[in-house]
Structure formats: structure tokens, C-alpha cells
Image (cartoon, helix red, strand yellow):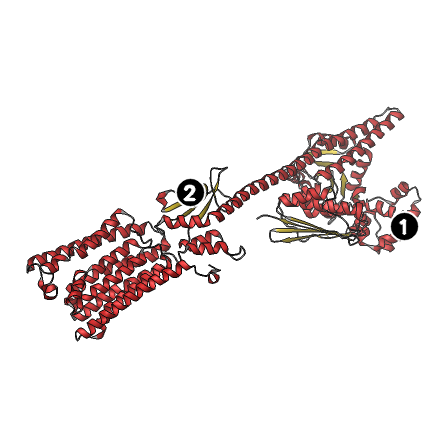
């Protein structure tokens, strides 16, 4: 978040930090005790003594980081529990019998924790029933099926403390049962994760696939190292033990890596959202962006409730259908004082806890409601603009039709009538007075035709229909008594509405200048920029013109507004008139 | 005189045909679109083409474009363009390369049958006939461009206007009720004032004048 550095962390986070720090200190001292007991207990090399505790600390550090970043996500606590299990399991190597016994009982438990992590990533929850059974089975294999190994083999625990009898066959059978059940758990895990990968979008699959792969390999490799790899590769017991530990140590690193690569939330603080709401409007990113950052899901969408439509729209006012559950996306509705204001659409595979989204929804409810009104307004404003544009378009179409109809109809008729009158005048034998009357009639018809030409020109001038804006302005200037300077630029294609609007603006401005400005010259300039036409009309007259006063200019201001353009009239008293219009030309 | 008519309005087409037949012209064909006009002139090889500017299919300047195309193919063919609205721009395009007689008139001028037929005959004879309205447009525009025009007297202005319309000295003398000798004097003054190259026949004269005005 852009304003993140300026946000003071709230007190609640300090207390959580303190808790995690305390836990870390406890685990650290445990590791220290373990190292001391081990190192001073027997003459093994120093590195084997510190390897297990350091692995435990790696789990602890990764777990603490995840817990801190994302308090509602259980991955952190699971990893911290894993650290505890590892450190306790490591006690098996010490010379203190009471502690060593704990290590014997928990010897394979870290593997169950890794299975648990695999099923819980990235949401921190084991959601599906197959996953739940598999994780429970993993713990059972590591804790319950471990029992025959020390119950029937006195050599397994110090002084045979945990042994009930010396029955090597039972111990061996228990071992085989544990291996078989463990293999079944891993097959189930692989199947479940593969299914989950298939349903994951490609970018996340790139993060999840290596993680899942490594997790499964680690769980399979750790038990196989002493029994299969050691005889095959001729490893010393110390080295094979080290390989086991290192393979396990990489697990938390992999999970933290996946987390940082986008596997889950960067920050999960609802408080960050509150800070966003408090930030000044100009500096803050959009609500959807802030929410995406807070929830750690870039695909988060905001839907705004529009009661009138009985449906949701997006920020731009477009209709937004809510996703169905089979798309992997979930919806949390946001309410304010019992009234629906919107919804948050998120990725259910990324965020396992709808409670977190609901909490975020409560924080942003007011902002969402405000933006809802804006979205609703935007939708109706666009509708209004479209309808106004349709009206202008229809009026232009009507003007064109009237001009064309007059051209083909009455104007042609007047030519024929005048011809008819003139032929009457020329019929041999017509008395002089009748002939003169017929000629006078022809001249009056010609006058009527001239008046009609003026009218048609005002409705929709022929040059605009036949040759477009440049020719029409040129013709307009030709018919004006005032000297004019034209700068029309290269002739480019323009939408009909833009041409008509620009033309009527220039015509109106020139007519105003001719009538009121007492100007000696006038200038018209067209500038074609990318997707916008700039129309300028200047005169050196008395000024004092105003968009509000003239009858023509307000109507033109409306037309320009419909196109999404702007009209500016500068007309200081005695300083001439300068009219500038910007007309967007669409695509 | 074999005439081809380009006009899409049926009644006007008929009316114009009647006027022409009455005036002694031989109407050899009619066309209702720009393309049909071009095709008909290729086929019929008339002496004169009279066309409306606004014609199908575009209903913009299809008739004018057809006329210019015909001129490019048949340089000796006389052309008269009619319109309900005159533009300086169209006059300039028509007079850009006048290889034969050229006319540009308001449609309403048809009603003055005798003058109209006389104008057509002059165009057929290779002369240029411009509607007074378009000459007025040219003059008004030229006045703001050329200071020399301001040095002309009102009477010289009248003479210049009629020269641009394509009128002969005799016609001008009659129209202004002066002697032809007086007209010749006015013309020579206009020529020296506007610094135009001297030309003997009326056809070259109108071109020089319109070119000056359209510059």
C-alpha cells in the first residue's frame, strides 16, 4: 500500500508480536537446552547435535513470520507446532531418560506435520472431508502405529522404559503396518493435491506444484533414507540422519517461499483497510486494490448492489453477475445497518476463511455504500448521455432528410413551375399583357426559389452534405461580407455529428460577429488532434459576448456537451471574441 | 447539337428535355446516376453533357465527379453543371483544366429559357458561362485577398463581373447601356490594374479573370 509507511501499527498488533516473540524465546531456549544436553552428553560431532534444533528453529521462524503476517491463517500456528514436535522429537538423542522417551514417542510426528501443512496450504484450513481424513490418518500413523515399535522392542527406549514385552515379530509387524499405512496416506495426499492443482489457475499452479511435489518427496524420502538409501549408497548413520533432517528443514523454507511468491497473503491486516479509509482520497489506491492487498487475493472484485435493478453492478455501472460456486469463486455479501450494499467476490481456493472476508466487508461497508451510489449514478448518467446523443443525432438526421426532401421535391417543382410560366409567356399569339404577367410570375417563382435555397442552406447546407466540414466553412466565409482568415488544416474524416456541431458553432459565431461585434476581420481555425477536433473562431470586435445571452450559443453548448466536448467563450469588453470548442471524435 | 442529360428527378429530367428540344437541341440520352452518366457519354459521344451535381448513389457530389471524369476522357466535350447551391470550390474544380466549353449555373436559371439556351450554345462553342451568383462569391473572396480590386471604380467592377460570367464586350455594352468602345477602355484598364496578360478572345479572357479571382 502506498501509504503503508505512514501507518502506525495499531496496539493489537504489538501484543500479537509480543506473544509470538515470547513463544520464539521459549522455543529458542528449548533448542539451546537440547544442544547443551546433546553436546555435553556424548562425543558426537558438533554439527549433528545442532542440526535438529536448528531445523526446529527454522520451522519456528517460518511459522512466526506467517502468523505475524496473517493472524487468521492457521499455517503459522501449524508450523510453530511443527517446530515444537521437531524439538521434542530431537530429545530422543539426549542422555536424560525422561526426555529421551518423549523423543521416541514423537520420532515420526514431524512427517505428519508436513502432511498437515500440505493439505492446509494456502488457506491454513483443511477444508474437504478427504483431506481431513488423510491428515487424521497421517497423525494416527505417526503417533499410534509408532506404539508397537517401542512397546514390543525394549531396545527402542532407554532401559526399555516403554516396552511391555520383547516381541520382535510383533515390533516388525507393527513397523510394516506403519510403512504400509504411511504409503497409503501419501498416495491419498498425492491424489488430493493433484486434483486441487487441476482446479487451480495457471499462475498459482506454478507456485503450488513445486511446493506440493517437494512436500510429498520429503515425506517419502525421510523414512526411506535409513532403510533403503543408506545401504544402497553406503552412508554412515550420522550422514543419513543429517540428510533426513536437512530434507525436513527445507520444508518450512519452501512454504515461506511459496507464501512470498504469492501463494498467500502479503499482509492480511483488516487494520490496513481501516488505515486506507483514513488516508486522503488523492493518495489512496482504489477500494478494490486495497481490499485485494489486504486479503492477499488479486482477483478480488467489488459488486455494488442496485436495488432498482435488483442486481449488482461494478464500479463503472455495468451489470455484474455473481459467480456460481463451481467456478472456485465465492461471494460474501456486505451489509450496512441490515441493508445490503454490495458483495465481495473472491477466490475460494486462496482464502479459506469467509470470516476474514466478512470482517473486511464490515470495515469497508461505508466506503462501499458511498461508491455504490457513485456507481449507480454513473450508470444512469451514461444512460442519460446516450439518450441525449440519440436526440441530437435524430435531429441531424431530420435536418438532412428535410434538406434532401426539399431539394428533390419543392425545389424541383419550383424550377418546373417557372419553366411552365415562361413557356406560357412565349406561346405565339399570347397578348402582350398576358405574356408580361406570365414573365412576372416566373420571376416571382424564381424569387420564391431563392428564398427556399436560403432556408435549405440554414437547415443543412449543401456543402456540408456534399463535401464535409472544410467545404462548408469555406462556403460560409464566401457568403460573409467580413474578411476572413481560414486555417482548416488537412481534410480528415470526422463523424457526422462532430462535423455538424463544428459547422453550426462556426456559423453561429460568425453570424454573431457579423451582427453584433463591429469587427473588421474574423479567423476560423480547425486543429485535428488525435481523437479531438479543436474549433476556434476569433474576431477583433467589441467583445462582451456570453454563452448565456445569445440564443444560438447555449443550444450549441448543449450539443457540444452531448459529444463530451467543451466550449469556452472569451469575450472581454473591447477585446474581441475568442471561441474555442473541443470536440471528441470517438475512435 | 447532341445533348446528354444527367438528372435523377424524373419530372426535372422531363422538364429539362422539353426545354432543350424546344430550344433546338437533340437530347440523345438521359442518365440517373453518376456512373450511368459516364457510361452514357462513352457510348453516345454527345456534344454537350448537362448534369445535376447531387445524384445517386452517394447523393453528394456524384454528378460533378462524373463530369470531371468525362472531361478527363473526352477533353473536347462541353459540360454544363447545374445545382441548387453554388460553391466557389466547385467553380475552381470545373475551371481547373477547361479543355472545352464549361458552364456552372443555378438550376433555377433553366426557367429563363431563352437565356439558358443561349448560354448552352455558347458553352457548345467553347466558351465559359458562370452563374452571376458564383461570380459574386469569387469577387467577394478576391476582394479580401487582392488590394488591386479596391482600386477599380464601381463601373469597372460591373465590367469585371460580367467578364467573369463569360460575357462578350457587346453583351456588356448592352447590359450596362454604354458603347462597346467604352467597354474596351474599361477592360484594358482592368487588365493593366490587375496585371493580367492580354488576350483577344472571350474564352481566354474569362479564364484569366476567374483564375485571378480564384487565386
Please indicate, yes or no, whether residue A271 appears anywhere in the rendered image: yes
Label 1 sits on a secondary structure element that is loop
Vertical side of A42 occupied by A451: above or below: above
Relative horizontal placement of residue A283, taking residue A14 as reference (left or right): right
State if disc 2 and disc 1 touch (CB < 8 Å). Answer: no
> What residue is drawn where x is 65% and y is 43%?
A559
Q: Count how many numbered circles sit on residues in the image.
A: 2
Task: Give a yes or no on whether discs 1 and 2 share a subunit.
Answer: no
Q: Quadrant of residue A429?
A: top right
Mark 2, Cα crowd under 10 Å, few <14 / some 14-19 / many 20+, is some
Task: Tell whether B11 sits left or right of A263.
Answer: right
Residue located 70% across and 31% down the image: A409
Judge whether A92 appears above or below A477 on screen.
below
Q: Which mark is residue B153?
A: 1
- The x, y position of residue A128, in whole percent, is 28, 47
Is residue B75 visible to the viewer in this orientation of the structure?
no
| Circle 1 crowding by C-alpha within 10 Å: few under 14, some 14–19, many from 20 | few
Q: Is residue A337 above or below residue A216?
A: above
Instruction: Identify the image quadrant of residue A338.
Output: top left
Query: Quarter of the image containing the N terminus of chain B?
Result: top right
Query: Which chain letter goes with mark 1?
Result: B
Give residue A322's mark: 2
Amino acid at each position: 500500500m502506498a501509504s503503508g509507511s505512514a501507518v502506525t501499527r495499531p496496539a493489537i498488533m504489538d501484543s500479537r508480536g509480543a506473544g509470538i516473540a515470547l513463544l520464539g524465546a521459549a522455543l529458542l531456549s528449548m533448542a539451546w537446552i537440547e544442544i547443551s544436553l546433546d553436546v555435553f552428553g556424548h562425543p558426537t560431532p558438533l554439527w549433528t547435535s545442532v542440526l535438529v534444533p536448528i531445523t526446529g528453529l527454522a520451522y519456528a521462524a517460518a511459522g512466526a513470520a506467517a502468523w505475524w503476517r496473517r493472524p487468521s491463517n492457521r499455517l503459522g500456528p501449524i508450523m510453530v507446532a511443527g517446530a515444537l514436535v521437531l524439538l521434542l522429537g530431537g530429545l530422543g538423542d539426549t542422555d536424560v531418560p525422561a526426555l529421551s522417551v518423549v523423543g521416541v514417542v514423537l520420532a515420526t510426528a514431524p512427517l505428519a506435520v508436513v502432511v498437515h501443512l500440505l493439505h492446509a496450504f494456502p488457506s491454513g484450513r483443511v477444508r474437504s472431508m478427504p483431506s481431513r481424513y488423510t491428515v487424521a490418518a497421517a497423525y494416527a500413523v505417526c503417533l499410534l502405529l509408532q506404539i508397537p515399535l517401542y512397546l514390543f522392542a525394549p531396545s527402542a527406549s532407554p532401559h526399555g522404559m516403554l516396552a511391555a514385552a520383547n516381541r520382535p515379530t510383533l515390533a516388525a509387524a507393527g513397523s510394516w503396518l506403519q510403512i504400509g499405512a504411511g504409503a497409503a496416506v501419501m498416495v491419498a495426499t498425492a491424489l488430493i493435491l493433484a486434483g486441487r492443482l487441476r482446479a487451480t489457475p495457471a499462475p498459482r499452479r506454478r507456485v503450488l506444484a513445486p511446493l506440493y511435489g517437494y512436500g510429498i518427496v520429503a515425506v517419502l524420502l525421510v523414512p526411506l533414507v535409513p532403510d533403503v538409501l543408506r545401504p544402497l549408497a553406503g552412508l554412515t548413520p550420522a550422514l543419513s540422519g543429517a540428510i533426513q533432517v536437512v530434507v525436513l528443514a527445507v520444508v518450512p523454507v519452501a512454504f515461506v517461499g511459496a507464501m512470498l511468491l504469492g501463494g498467500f497473503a502479503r499482509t492480511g491486516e483488516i487494520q490496513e483497510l481501516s488505515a486506507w479509509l483514513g488516508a486522503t482520497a488523492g493518495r489512496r489506491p482504489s477500494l478494490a486494490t486495497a481490499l485485494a492487498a489486504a486479503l492477499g487475493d488479486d482477483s478480488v472484485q467489488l459488486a455494488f448492489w442496485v436495488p432498482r435493478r435488483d442486481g449488482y453492478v461494478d464500479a463503472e455501472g455495468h451489470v455484474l453477475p455473481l459467480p456460481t460456486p463451481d467456478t472456485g469463486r465465492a461471494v460474501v455479501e456486505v451489509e450496512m445497518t441490515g441493508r445490503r450494499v454490495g458483495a465481495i467476490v473472491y477466490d475460494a481456493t486462496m482464502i479459506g476463511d469467509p470470516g476474514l472476508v466478512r470482517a473486511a466487508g464490515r470495515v469497508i461497508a461505508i466506503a462501499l455504500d458511498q461508491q455504490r451510489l457513485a456507481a449507480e449514478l454513473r450508470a444512469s448518467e451514461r444512460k442519460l448521455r446516450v439518450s441525449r446523443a440519440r436526440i441530437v443525432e435524430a435531429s441531424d438526421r431530420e435536418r438532412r432528410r428535410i434538406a434532401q426532401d426539399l431539394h428533390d421535391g419543392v425545389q424541383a417543382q419550383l424550377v418546373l413551375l417557372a419553366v411552365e410560366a415562361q413557356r406560357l409567356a412565349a406561346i405565339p399569339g399570347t397578348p402582350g399583357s398576358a405574356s408580361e404577367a406570365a414573365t412576372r410570375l416566373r420571376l416571382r417563382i424564381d424569387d420564391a426559389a431563392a428564398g427556399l435555397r436560403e432556408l435549405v442552406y440554414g437547415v443543412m447546407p449543401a456543402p456540408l452534405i456534399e463535401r464535409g466540414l472544410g467545404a462548408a466553412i469555406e462556403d460560409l466565409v464566401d457568403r460573409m461580407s467580413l474578411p476572413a482568415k481560414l486555417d482548416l488544416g488537412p481534410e480528415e474524416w470526422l463523424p457526422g455529428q462532430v462535423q455538424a456541431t463544428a459547422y453550426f458553432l462556426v456559423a453561429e459565431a460568425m453570424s454573431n460577429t457579423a451582427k453584433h461585434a463591429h469587427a473588421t476581420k474574423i479567423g476560423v481555425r480547425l486543429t485535428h488532434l488525435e481523437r479531438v477536433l479543436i474549433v476556434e473562431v476569433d474576431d477583433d470586435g467589441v467583445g462582451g459576448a456570453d454563452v448565456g445571452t445569445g440564443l444560438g450559443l447555449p443550444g450549441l453548448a448543449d450539443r457540444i456537451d452531448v459529444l463530451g466536448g467543451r466550449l469556452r467563450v472569451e469575450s472581454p469588453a473591447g477585446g474581441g471574441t475568442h471561441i474555442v470548442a473541443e470536440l471528441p471524435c470517438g475512435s | 447539337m447532341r445533348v446528354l442529360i444527367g438528372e435523377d428527378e424524373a419530372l426535372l429530367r422531363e422538364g429539362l428535355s422539353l426545354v432543350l428540344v424546344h430550344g433546338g437541341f437533340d437530347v440523345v440520352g438521359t442518365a440517373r446516376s453518376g456512373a450511368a452518366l459516364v457510361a452514357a457519354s462513352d457510348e453516345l459521344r454527345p456534344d454537350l453533357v448537362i448534369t445535376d451535381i447531387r445524384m445517386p448513389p452517394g447523393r453528394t457530389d456524384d454528378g460533378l465527379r462524373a463530369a470531371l471524369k468525362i472531361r478527363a476522357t473526352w477533353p473536347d466535350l462541353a459540360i454544363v453543371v447545374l445545382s441548387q447551391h453554388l460553391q466557389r470550390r466547385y467553380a475552381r474544380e470545373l475551371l481547373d483544366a477547361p479543355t472545352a466549353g464549361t458552364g456552372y449555373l443555378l438550376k433555377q436559371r433553366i426557367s429563363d429559357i431563352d437565356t439558358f439556351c443561349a448560354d448552352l450554345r455558347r458553352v457548345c462553342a467553347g466558351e465559359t458561362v458562370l452563374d452571376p451568383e458564383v461570380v459574386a462569391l469569387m469577387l467577394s473572396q478576391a476582394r479580401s485577398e487582392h488590394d488591386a480590386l479596391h482600386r477599380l471604380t464601381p463601373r469597372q467592377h460591373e465590367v469585371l463581373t460580367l467578364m467573369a460570367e463569360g460575357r462578350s464586350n457587346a453583351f456588356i455594352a448592352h447590359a450596362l447601356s454604354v458603347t462597346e468602345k467604352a467597354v474596351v477602355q474599361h477592360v484594358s484598364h482592368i487588365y493593366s490594374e490587375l496585371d493580367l496578360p492580354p488576350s483577344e478572345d472571350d474564352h481566354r479572357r474569362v479564364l484569366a479573370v476567374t483564375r485571378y479571382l480564384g487565386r
